[in-house]
Image (cartoon, coloured by chain):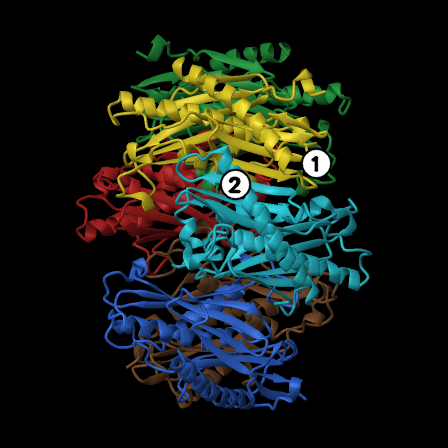
Chain colours: A blue, B cyan, C brown, D yellow, E red, F green
Amino acid sequence: MRPNNRSLDSLRNVTLEAGASKYAEGSCLAKFGDTHVLCTASVDENVPRWMKGKGKGWVTGEYGMLPRSTHSRNNREAARGKQGGRTVEIQRLIGRSLRAAVDLSKLGERQIIVDCDVMQADGGTRTASITGAWVALYLACEKLVADGKIKENPVTDNMAAVSAGIVEGECRLDLEYVEDSAAQADANFVLTQTGGVIEVQASAEDTPFTADEMAELMRLAVKGIGELCEMQQQAVKST
Amino acid sequence: MRPNNRSLDSLRNVTLEAGASKYAEGSCLAKFGDTHVLCTASVDENVPRWMKGKGKGWVTGEYGMLPRSTHSRNNREAARGKQGGRTVEIQRLIGRSLRAAVDLSKLGERQIIVDCDVMQADGGTRTASITGAWVALYLACEKLVADGKIKENPVTDNMAAVSAGIVEGECRLDLEYVEDSAAQADANFVLTQTGGVIEVQASAEDTPFTADEMAELMRLAVKGIGELCEMQQQAVKST
Amino acid sequence: MRPNNRSLDSLRNVTLEAGASKYAEGSCLAKFGDTHVLCTASVDENVPRWMKGKGKGWVTGEYGMLPRSTHSRNNREAARGKQGGRTVEIQRLIGRSLRAAVDLSKLGERQIIVDCDVMQADGGTRTASITGAWVALYLACEKLVADGKIKENPVTDNMAAVSAGIVEGECRLDLEYVEDSAAQADANFVLTQTGGVIEVQASAEDTPFTADEMAELMRLAVKGIGELCEMQQQAVKST
Amino acid sequence: MRPNNRSLDSLRNVTLEAGASKYAEGSCLAKFGDTHVLCTASVDENVPRWMKGKGKGWVTGEYGMLPRSTHSRNNREAARGKQGGRTVEIQRLIGRSLRAAVDLSKLGERQIIVDCDVMQADGGTRTASITGAWVALYLACEKLVADGKIKENPVTDNMAAVSAGIVEGECRLDLEYVEDSAAQADANFVLTQTGGVIEVQASAEDTPFTADEMAELMRLAVKGIGELCEMQQQAVKST
Amino acid sequence: MRPNNRSLDSLRNVTLEAGASKYAEGSCLAKFGDTHVLCTASVDENVPRWMKGKGKGWVTGEYGMLPRSTHSRNNREAARGKQGGRTVEIQRLIGRSLRAAVDLSKLGERQIIVDCDVMQADGGTRTASITGAWVALYLACEKLVADGKIKENPVTDNMAAVSAGIVEGECRLDLEYVEDSAAQADANFVLTQTGGVIEVQASAEDTPFTADEMAELMRLAVKGIGELCEMQQQAVKST
Amino acid sequence: MRPNNRSLDSLRNVTLEAGASKYAEGSCLAKFGDTHVLCTASVDENVPRWMKGKGKGWVTGEYGMLPRSTHSRNNREAARGKQGGRTVEIQRLIGRSLRAAVDLSKLGERQIIVDCDVMQADGGTRTASITGAWVALYLACEKLVADGKIKENPVTDNMAAVSAGIVEGECRLDLEYVEDSAAQADANFVLTQTGGVIEVQASAEDTPFTADEMAELMRLAVKGIGELCEMQQQAVKST
């Protein structure tokens, strides 16, 4: 039995609270069960130096965890003087995923930085981050349209992310921490609402798994992401 | 007139939400108007190396701001690879202030780290941090007592912090951002409920101010801290 | 047409030269066309601190590129004072992949560090790294057996890595640089000889791709990895 | 009894040697007893980037201790790769204090950097630094006037700094190291010659102190700073 | 007896393989016995900022060792976050040596960076680096001439480097590792083909040595460098 | 003509003030004309970790320049977060030189760190550092003997350092800054009083120089170091 009697293909209780930050151009507090991530999209009227003069924009992501967002405290990355490998890997994933859903040429020469800061972590922080980041990004783009800076919203696809994994021999959707830490395999999917593939990352924990299991994990993800995309649309309409 | 018609000696709307974090041994979400700080106290059963074998404990503070907690985005300190001077200064102040209110010899050889993370900043983040940190620290110590690890709560004083400053020639309590950025002088006070002095830091902005003005700022702080200490006591009782 | 008239499911010209380093306990110079990676496995009789006393070993990977391994020179990471995000991501992948093919409990409390240093880069450096790293790791373990330090070789699976991607609408195996830089999608697979999944990482470049294309990329990878695993077995026998 | 039979409101033996550096535009070797600080003011014809085009200048301070300026050796900050929290805090204090005594709009778009390097430390290094820094800054400004680069000296106030603290229950002026390390409270004051407040920083060591004690510490500081300002005027005349 | 019965004034088996890198403008794989260094010269059409507008060029060197180029593994400098003192010292030596053999005014406002990366180390890595770097630099300059970017090759002297030392009381040329680690004195010479002095660095290991011994070490170096310069000329002709 | 009519083989006006620091176990303020270096020797009762248990001691040097010790200000290395290449190179030279004049087995398992901090720089800071460092080191060892911690002073040789160079075609001893910056060749010698060689470092600036010139530079150095060693002996007797 999964915790809280969840079925194998059920998401946790998800809420996407748009407009959670007073200052950011777009924001979303994404909660996947006890995993809470604050996503804020900040518009910067400059692009990175290497993109200057190309007539198009840039979207990037940053990721951080509060030191006590986890069961036991982790040292603060700012105090250690560098971001850990996991952080770097996740924020590169966030950035790549968002860019695949935006037409950068319609953004103008400006950058949108989406910060995903984990307030509380109970598994799946990267997928909650991407799902909330899409809402924050979409709203920031809407504001650019409303402010007359761009003609149309450059977000091309509705997309979201979810994890799936093999726990106790079962393929399960949206693992929480106790499942994640016992998983034989762990996968993260970033897909469009219509099932288009943006990113797939799957890892065996101790022993390899089969191509059939891989296919089942993907099937679960398609289902979950369909539901998440609907919630995202509700969220952006609510503001 | 102050924003929202506040009188010169009034605090902003303050709430102290104890238990805001699922995992931390003690926590408090401190809101001073639109300034929101999440304070978590983490018990570490080891003391820093230089304190080993002394038979007493240690309390320290760390401070951070989310990149978009402010009107415009600040670069992430973890990404820049170092904490800025202001951050270092504030977290040293938090640590010193908390230690002055604790009998370290009653804590045992363990450390309590209080993280103060600013979710949203509208002036006075360091005083909101210290005020909330006291609640988080107190609750973590209560938990140590409840868990039978120490006999009595080593917190010796109820203390809090507040700012006061000179704006448009007036001495005002608890400045918010628009006042802070226009202040001729800015002071931060950490006092006990009975007016005992733990820390005073006062700075002239452009031109020196008088000893009488300094005394008036302190008078305002004594009043405000009296009120904050009562709220802290309500907060720790509420859990 | 692919460069050099390669067919869609053909590997580049691959050689795996075991024993390429005079000092390392195991080594392999892996060449995938013009991509050349020197892989050396070093036995360290200590495990990382957090693994002490657990009675098992650890395997980790490090990755670097010579500054002029690429078409234009990249700044030296040692001079910049930090490893870039791409480097960190790749070396985490190498480590995870190798550990999935080793029974750490049979390694004893020691660590094997596999360094993958790119001499020349023409696309697919991470997959050449993993493929060569397996050979270096296997040989280092053989040496531990020969030296009487462990009873049997703890490598549990023969595994290798290869890339596949979508270029000009075609799914192609083992992309070289000119293909990689024009790809609509790019995927890296780490599989066992029998098709067991260790790692899958797939990214859309600009626009999402379909689940069918994902399946075709995987089919190509299974074929290529079968061939690579045979070459690895030849290589380890040759020493 | 205080060391050397000093009375409670007496400074240590203070000398301010103007022109102690051959190259700096302004300099002062400030000695407060056995605390020796070399202060050099360097004119930089550029302002920091964020101040460009504002038509005014900037004054900043830097602080360092020689590794063996203290009783036992401290590691060199340059070797550790970062400045410690105490250093950062002190140099921010030096900069703020100096800027409060200068009309930056009269300085032109240039920067003066005042380096305060502690040759020997016996308590009160930050107050000796600020007192000597004012002399160095004043002389560098005189040189700018003499060189025809500015019309009048932009230093608006004669100001100095001194410590006071509570030791063995007594309020004492200008603590030396043996007193400082035994103090119940420690305060640093930066005041103008006429008692105007620039900076006040007071900290309780273990237990809070009273508002009356705070007032007495300030009274001592006003007296001491009056004497220091006269010595500064002698020093700048002597060159 | 020296290893392999080498006579006191014999070089190890030396090969200089020009064109070892596919991409670099000039390259050389220098082997002095088991010491193997890959030297690549990269043309950068920008000079360092402090040289802009001076109408002349710059030549610099960088040096690195692969982690397992040595008997036991060294930590990767990129992972440690800084280059060690030995690395810094060697790359400064490489740069100074090369610049002394080039007329920078004939190079135009461009920079040549010569990377010397040690694949395998058996003593004398810095002298093999300089010897190979000269070849790489020369070839890169030839390419600039061939590409019509400069009129004539700005390399003014044929020069090379070799070590000599005192081992078991004997002065010996071109020490290998087992000799180096037992040497009473160790010297490195960078000389022109005609014996002109570019750099001399000699160090006593435990006890001082005599001026006569110094002279003998230099005599050995002159002989060895004469031979190396001839090999360099063969190497550049071979491409 | 040299500045101040110095003859080619004359030192600048040199003074070695032993005991210049109140706290250090040994110290010397070395002045070579306008080059002033404070050298302090600190005894640390621990050796570096890699030397533990070998029954012998260690001597090391550190070097720094005050930011405004030079004609124009240099950024503080502690603020930049790393020591520059020149600093690293010099402090390695200081350490090696001192160790060649000490019998480490007679020092016991302790470390002496000699800090050489340049107060004012007018050429030859590294040679003034080494010359003063020897005095500081000798005195610290004397103190160890006087304190009964070791039986005899482990310093085996009287040694000093001086520069020599080729300026306007002339070989000159002990270059000052205006000469140094115009030199065709620059050499630093660390020799014993009897002419034993500890370190020689010679560099051509633009064009190679001859072996005869090298011999003449060494002859000058032998003369200068003879004089410096006598001054060192006066200095250590004076305390």
**Residue under circle 1?**
F46
- Residue at mark 2: chain: B
Q: Secondary structure at mark 2?
A: helix
Identify residue type, mark 2.
Glu
Can you give x and y, in whole percent of width and height, for residue C216 in the image?
Answer: 42, 88
Instruction: Look at the image and tell me whether residue C147 can be seen.
Output: yes
Residue F33, picture quadrant: top left
Give how far across and how far down residue B132 sits, in percent.
60, 58
Q: Amino acid at mark 1?
A: Asn
Residue A234 or residue F175, whichever sits in front: A234
> How dense is the environment of label 1, judged by Cα within 10 Å: few (below 14), some, or many (20 and up)?
some
The residue at the point 53 percent across, 29 percent down is D127
Residue F166 is drawn in which quadrant? top left
Q: Chain of mark 1?
A: F
Give whichever of B230, B125 is nearer the camera: B230
Side of D118 relative to E59 (left or right): right
Q: Cβ–Cβ below 8 Å for labels 1 and 2?
A: no
Q: Residues within 10 Å of mark 2 (few under 14, many from 20)?
A: some
Position of residue C163 relative to residue E78, above or below, is below
Question: Would you place residue A80 above or below residue D205 in this image?
Answer: below
In the image, A164: left or right of B27? Answer: left
Mark number for residue B216? 2
Q: How many numbered marks appear? A: 2
